[in-house]
Image (cartoon, rainbow, N blue to C red):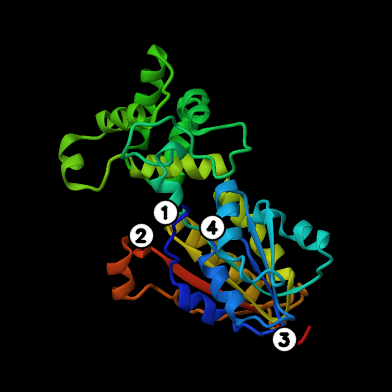
Amino acid sequence: MFEHKSVLLHETIDSLNIKADGIYVDGTLGGGGHAFEVCRRLGDGGKLIGIDQDGDAIAAATERLKEFPGRTVIVRNNYENIAEVLRDLGIEKVDGIYLDLGVSSYQLDTAERGFTYREDVPLDMRMDQRNPRTAADIVNTYSESELYRMIRDYGEDRFAKNIAKHIVKAREKKPIETTGELTEIIKAAIPAKIRATGGHPAKQTFQAIRIELNRELDVLNRSIDRMIGLLNPGGRLSIITFHSLEDRIVKTRFKTNENPCTCPPDFPVCVCGKKSRGRVITRKPILPSEEEIQENSRSKSAKLRVFERNGNE
């Protein structure tokens, strides 16, 4: 079963200021945990559109939300296509959009999905199983410099150069096909004393490959402005991130939408004509409570940021 403890559940729901007759979009539906709470607060005139690219998530959320048949529309797609999804449903604007960008517990714990470095399974990591390319393709076809860039930028691993070199050397003998093989190669590239004290040595490289394969940062970066544009006046966009790269993108895009002026600071008046699209509600991100972290260790790195569309448009 698609189990996923919804992180920052109440904080996210509260941040959306849900109206009973409003329209809300869950861009990363997962098992439907956040969506269930949204639906509970909607009246007969309200609607929740749930989007997810993972077939298992769609099945689980459909089951989870079946007690709200008139209020939910579930679509298998990537949230980067949110404008097209809404257009197909005849919806122009919505009252709130939220994203929970973490890999679901289900994806991590279902070994055969190939996200885990704790078991030896085929290298997969696809969030959308319709994608013909897998993690194994990246590991076996990227050049050493491409692997290095990916592990450095997306894994923020200081041993990225050495890991890339070890991967290329290993695959000259035979293709790297499983998570176990890749984990051993990564371990060999990291000094023993670091391995003894740090977290799991493969964690950052696996994160990097997953982000690259599923285009996670690219999709996020390109979608935020689009999502803000789909909000009704006073509507909110709430995004939960799980690592610094995602959080930086959200923080930067929110800031730019709040203050897009590109005039030099010494100009007495703005001449660029770029108007603010709203305001950042969270000057500092909302973090999980100590209690939530104890109950669900995966929430430890979660951060929630919220943007509100201008009310006068």
The answer to whether residue 259 shows anywhere in this view is: no
Q: Amino acid at mark 1?
A: Ser
Q: CA distance from mark 4 to mark 3?
A: 31 Å
Q: First in sequence, mark 1 or 3: give its number.
A: 1
Label 4 sits on a secondary structure element that is: loop
Q: State whether residue 82 is above or below residue 254.
A: above
Q: First in sequence, mark 2 or 1: give its number.
A: 1
Farthest-out residue, top: 173
Q: Position of residue 228 (x, y in %)?
A: 69, 70
Which residue is under mark 1?
105
Which residue is under mark 4?
30
Mark whose residue sits in front, 2 or 1 = 1
Label 3 sits on a secondary structure element that is: loop
Mark whose residue sits in front, 4 or 2 = 4
Q: State whether residue 73 is above or below residue 157.
A: below
Q: First in sequence, mark 4 or 1: give its number.
A: 4
Query: Looking at the figure, which quarter contains the C terminus?
Result: bottom right
Q: Amino acid at mark 2?
A: Arg
**Is the residue marked by circle 4 packed among few (<14), some (14-19), or many (20+) residues within 10 Å?**
many
Which residue is under mark 2?
298
Mark whose residue sits in front, 4 or 3 = 4
Task: Please say if the residues under marks 3 and 2 sit with CB atoms less than 8 Å apart.
Answer: no
Q: Amino acid at mark 4?
A: Gly
Label 2 sits on a secondary structure element that is: helix
Which residue is under mark 3?
311
Q: Amino acid at mark 3?
A: Gly
Q: CA distance from mark 2 to mark 1?
A: 8 Å
**Is the residue marked by circle 2 packed among few (<14), some (14-19), or many (20+) residues within 10 Å?**
some
